[in-house]
Image: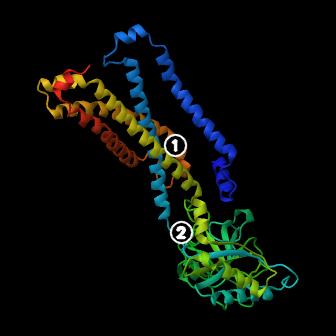
Amino acid sequence: MGDLNAGLARAKGNQIKIDAPVLLFGLAASLLTGVLFGLAPSLRVSCVDLNEGLKDLGKSTEGRSRHALRNLLVTAELALAFVLVVGAGLLAKSFLRLMNVDLGYDAHNVLTLSTYVYGSRYQNKPEVELNYYSEVMQHIRATPGIQSVAMVSTLPLNGFDRRGFHIQDRPLANESEASSVDTYSVSPDYFRVMRIPLKRGRAFTDQDGPGAPQVALISESCAKSQFPNEDPIGKHIQLGGRHDEKPWATIVGVVGDVRQYALDRAPGMEAYIAQAQDLGFSYNLVARTTLDPRRLERAVHDAFMAVDKTQPVFNVAPLDAYLEGTLAERTFTLALLGLFGGLALTLAAVGIYGVISYSVSLRTREVGIRMALGAQRRDVLGMVLRQGLALIGVGLLAGFAASLALTQFLSSLLYEVRPTDLATSVVVAVTLAAVAMAASYVPARRATRVDPMVALRYE
């Protein structure tokens, strides 16, 4: 998976492209494949004994070995198609379940960017830094298309800041025994912008400023883990190390859990502190929009420049982009398996059609005799379809057995779906069988239209 992740990273940076060496390699591989697969029948034809060939002229029979090889290739194609389509089906099922996961926030129509302050103007001057962020947010709120705006130290799905979680009335013998929580410094409107629900108590307000008592919010998972069977509201905590001589933050509310690391990872414990009470972070802006966030990237960037053009602004992107990044590996693998599965299914259908068609042509005289002796068209149709059904059955059984082993390699990409998911295998088997039977039906139908008088003269 490391190589795949590296490849996706390069692709994201536009470092993968089709150039002359790639095209030449593809051309050479295609030519070599054509030569190798054309060489075997050419050698077989060149070794034919002319006398034997003249004796066999007009006969409509062939060697059992060649017939068996042809059937083997068709069943192998069907088995390969089964494995690839099952893999694509498992990933698609997993992908759909991931898309229905509750993130704990609404990532749609949210524009984000990263920033920080530097320079003597802001050094050791928290009130100046706070005023800078406040002015920027005022400019952005006045921009048409902006619904609400806030600041946060760490964006969901983009990094982490884990700190020790200390409770005032629960001293520990060793600080290393403290639980750790994902820590966020946020402005008051953050939960409204992200639509993170308030479960209990209150959220931050403008009154939670530098001179006010320190406050904090915790997530629902943190409340259940650290304060089982008791109300966390009013408890006093510190994040990081324990320093009894420093002020303790009072928990004033409990908010919903968020998935910080990935869609397939359960939410952890989170704690939030008011931005105005601790500015020891770099920040990200989050702005909920009423239209496509990409259309507002320039306006939001210009709002920062209007307040202080010397401060950096970077990573301007919709929050959806981070969500798509976590799904990139699955999306890439799903696309590949879907493409190869479709090609394998097409080849298997063509192979079955070719084998049945050729078999019908070889048995034309037999079909004519059967019909002359009173065989009904449905009897002939069933006889030919049974041949196709035998190939389909063997191919699906082989494919099912192979899929049990090979789909285990997809387990790291699956979410709430087992590699041996029986429902997916059944759906794929029915689909492949239907396609293969349709491919068998065409030559079988043609066999029922054979004129017995013509067939009896067939050599």
Residue 87's place in the image compared with 165, above or below, is: above
Percent x, y for residue 92? 46, 54
Check disc 1 and report the residue beneath it.
408
Report the Cα–Cα distance between label 2 and label 1.
Answer: 27 Å
> Which amino acid type corresponds to the residue marked 1 in the rendered image?
Gln
Percent x, y for residue 205? 63, 89
Tag shown at residue 103? 2
Q: 10 Å neighbourhood of mark 2: few (<14), some, or many (≥20)?
A: many
- Which of disc 1 and disc 2 is earlier in sequence? 2
Query: Which element is circle 1 on?
Result: helix
Percent x, y for residue 187? 66, 83
Residue 231 makes an appearance in the image: no
Relative to 235, 312 lies left or right = right
Q: Quadrant of residue 301?
A: bottom right
Residue 388's place in the image compared with 166, above or below, is: above
Residue extending farthest right: 120
Residue nearest the viewer, comparing 237 with 408: 408
Residue extending farthest top: 51
Residue nearest the viewer, comparing 392 with 288: 392
Query: Which element is circle 2 on?
Result: loop
Q: How is the image coloured?
A: rainbow
The residue at 29%/30% (across/down) is: 387
> Which amino acid type corresponds to the residue marked 2 in the rendered image?
Leu
The residue at 53%/24% (across/down) is: 39
